[in-house]
Image (spheres, rainbow, N blue to C red):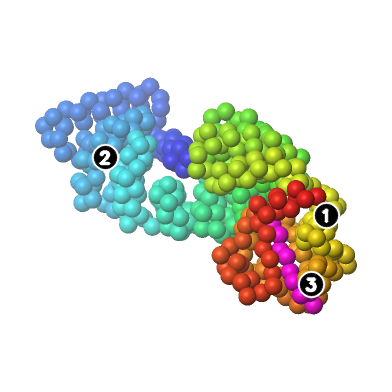
Amino acid sequence: MSAWLYLLAAGAVLGTAAFLWLRRDGGGSGRRSRLAEVREANRRLVQNPRDPEALAVLASAAFEEQDFPRAFQHYQVLLPLASAGAPKDSFQVTLRYAQAARNSGKMEEAYQGFLLALDLDKESFEVSYNLGVLEYGRKNYTRAVGFLRQAAAAQPDHAQTLKYLGHGLFQLKQHKEAAAALSRSLDLEPEDTGAQFALARSYYGLSSNEPALAIFSRLRTDPQYGAQSSLFAGTIHMNTKQAARALEDFAIGLRHPGTPANVTLELQYRKAAVHAREGDIPAALALWKEILAVQADYRDVQELSARYQEVHSSRHLQDYLLASSAEFLSLCRKVAVKYYPGGAAKLLSIGLQRAEYADLLAQVRTPQWEELVLFRFLRTSGSVGELMLRDFYARLKEVRAGRGVCLTAGGFSEQAAAFVEARMIDLVEKEGLVKLFRRI
């Protein structure tokens, strides 16, 4: 639910509360007396359209009947007249003017009205709360939090104040305080799914994945927050390498009808990423195709689709990027042995670094020379930068190899290529790697 819908819902609640607090005796005699007052007020307004007492009667009657547009019209005329009266009466008129404006959807008039009321009573909970909500809707989060803190101090157990305070603190990235306020709000209104979702996001912002995941998982089937909750739950499972659970989360999110396009696209994007990481290239390609049909420039989908289409068509390239570590190392050994045509290579050592790359040291003899050669096989389809080449060069000197060969299923940046220009290091990009695969 948007902040403005929250605001209108909160306004309706507070308007009803004000109505119950301010209404007169609801008995038959009171009703007849009220009607007589209204008739008299209308008569007086015919003679004097700016009669403050008549306007007050008509405005109050309309407000109590919750006819807020009509109440606003009367209070709009009464407001400048009331400013000359007693401070208490002036505050009451100003407050009701702001409330009527808010409940009529006139948010700018409501905002200005509550600011006027604040000048008359800086301790009013009703004024502080509404200004906090309005400032939140205007995305003035720092001011919103200031007003809502004041409202919370006046009424510590007002659930809506605590909820909006939590939302505002979250927007300011004060996740710890946001979580505290939202938790207190949920103690008072435990079924508020909006507050639950905001609390989960605050936990996520604190990297407290366990409590965040518990809430996101529970909200996956919620009609309003289910798709976004599924996205967050799937992201947590994806980042912790729980592929099956991540795919389940994303699938649940994609089943929600009426999901905003940006959320649907991101659910598809991350689901495709898990499929690709798990080696299910056809499933990933199908999802990327769906994304491109909706938004051709979404993130790096065009590049991913093209890259993995080629991977899908090359078994060796697919194994290089996606197979198990043992299969990857077996492929690297075959390439290293066959790298120098007409040469002979004896592998001396093999090292795998966090499944990101493998270093193979070989004694190579060709008709022209014989040297130690260090091969580094980078398991990536992205761009390799200069830092990786500097690390490789340091390792080259450490093992006292005379030559180096760095291979990748992606490419090298301009800085990386410039770094090796005066060094005995060969760079092999994807096209060259595919040619080497044809030799084995």
Q: Amino acid at mark 2?
A: Tyr
Dot 2 alpha-carbon crowd within 10 angstroms: few under 14, some 14 to 19, many 20 or more: many
Relative to residue 241, is residue 6 depicted above or below? above
Quote the CA–CA distance across marks 3 and 1: 21 Å
Q: Nearer the viewer, residue 72 or 360?
A: 360
| Drawn side of residue 166 relative to residue 270, left or right | left
Chief secondary structure of the magenta portion? strand
Q: Is residue 76 visible?
A: yes
The residue identified by callout 2 is 75
Start-end of magenta stretch? 400-408
Residue beneath the point at 69% across and 57% down: 408
Q: Is residue 155 left or right of residue 439?
A: left
Residue located 60% across and 43% down the image: 306
Mark 3 vs 2, N-terminal side: 2
Q: Amino acid at mark 3?
A: Trp
Q: Mark 2 and 1 residues: CB-CB less than 8 Å, in contact?
A: no
Q: Which mark is residue 334?
A: 1
Q: Which residue is mark 3?
A: 369
